Image (cartoon, helix red, strand yellow):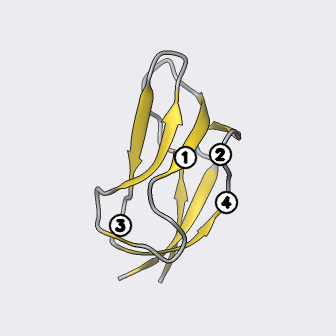
Amino acid sequence: MRVTVKLPRLADTVDEVVVVEWAAAVGAAVAEGDPLVRVETDKTVVDVPSPVAGVVSEHLVKADDEVTTGTPIAVIRAA
């Protein structure tokens, strides 16, 4: 099953972040909770965890992109 991962709300006052780097490359296997992507808020860098176990099949955003809460960021083929 294909799961489209959306950027979760990271804090009550944070709705926009900048993608720093992908922690999981396309083709990489991830477990639920593994770091998927690192993003920067106005105060810190945060790892966004994978919501499901599977294989990363697509990155929908790239480094330096500004992304808002709820934006699709990746596709994972769930295990």
Tell me the quadrant of the picture where the C terminus can be found. Answer: bottom left
Residue 60: image tag: 4
Q: Amino acid at mark 2?
A: Ala
List the residue tagged with mark 1: 21
From what the image shows, is residue 61 above or below residue 45?
Answer: below
Q: What is the C-alpha distance between the residues marked 1 and 4?
A: 13 Å
Q: What is the C-alpha distance between the residues marked 4 and 2?
A: 10 Å
Please report whichever mark, 1 or 2, sits nearer to the chain's N-terminal start. 1
Residue 63: image tag: 2
Question: x, y percentage for residue 78?
Answer: 41, 78
Please report whichever mark, 1 or 4, sits nearer to the chain's N-terminal start. 1
Residue count near mark 3 (Cα–Cα under 10 Å), binned few <14, some 14–19, many ≥20: some
Residue count near mark 1 (Cα–Cα under 10 Å), binned few <14, some 14–19, many ≥20: some
Helix, strand or loop for disc 3: loop
List the residue tagged with mark 3: 52
Evaluate if marks 1 and 2 touch, with contact meaning CB atoms under 8 Å apart. Answer: yes
Residue in the image at 56% along x and 39% along y = 20
Residue count near mark 4 (Cα–Cα under 10 Å), binned few <14, some 14–19, many ≥20: few
From what the image shows, is residue 74 above or below residue 13?
Answer: below
Helix, strand or loop for disc 2: loop
Q: What is the C-alpha distance between the residues marked 1 and 2?
A: 5 Å
| Total numbered labels | 4
Q: What is the C-alpha distance between the residues marked 3 and 4?
A: 17 Å
Q: What is the C-alpha distance between the residues marked 2 and 3?
A: 22 Å
Q: Is residue 36 left or right of residue 65?
A: left
Q: Does residue 69 appear anywhere in the picture? A: no
Q: Marks 2 and 3: which is nearer the front?
A: 2
From what the image shows, is residue 54 above or below residue 44?
Answer: below
Residue in the image at 57% along x and 62% along y = 74
Q: Amino acid at mark 3?
A: Val
Q: What is the C-alpha distance between the residues marked 1 and 3?
A: 19 Å
